[in-house]
Amino acid sequence: MTDRKRNQTRWVSALERTDVALAFVWGMLDPVSGAHMAARIRERLPRTPFTALEDVGHWPALEAPARVAAAILNA
């Protein structure tokens, strides 16, 4: 958590300023970076495609690989 606080400005700025296409597939049940982080992403990057997986936790690619792949391909 210390890294997050120390690097927050740099990391957020990189996401907000990148020329690389972004899309998020998010596990909303993640106890560390779940729904509260999803809300922040949507707030800071409102035009970025975002797929919320309501019944998935910290590892969406392992917990719901087919849905993650579909979300990425449709972004």
Image: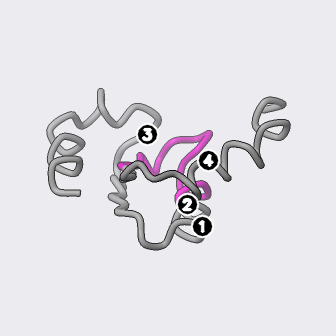
Q: Earlier in the sequence, mark 4 or mark 2?
A: 4
Q: Earlier in the sequence, mark 4 or mark 3?
A: 4
Marks 4, 2: nearer the viewer: 4
- Identify residue type, mark 3: Gly
Query: How would you rate the neighbour count of disc 1 (Cα within 10 Å): few for under 14, some for 14-19, many for 20 or more?
Result: few
Which residue is nearer to you in this view: 51 or 16? 16
Marks 4, 1: nearer the viewer: 4
**Residue position for label 4:** 14
| Residue at mark 1 to residue at mark 2: CA–CA distance | 5 Å
Marks 3, 2: nearer the viewer: 2
**In the rendering, which numbered label is found on residue 57?**
3
Helix, strand or loop at label 2? It is helix
Q: Are dots 1 and 2 in contact, CB under 8 Å? A: yes
Q: Earlier in the sequence, mark 4 or mark 1?
A: 4
**Residue position for label 1:** 44
Helix, strand or loop at label 1? It is helix
Q: Which residues are magenta?
A: 25-38
| Residue at mark 1 to residue at mark 3: CA–CA distance | 22 Å
Does 1 appear in magenta?
Answer: no
- Identify residue type, mark 4: Ala
Say whether residue 72 is left or right of residue 47: left
Q: Earlier in the sequence, mark 1 or mark 3?
A: 1
Q: Are dots 1 and 3 in contact, CB under 8 Å? A: no
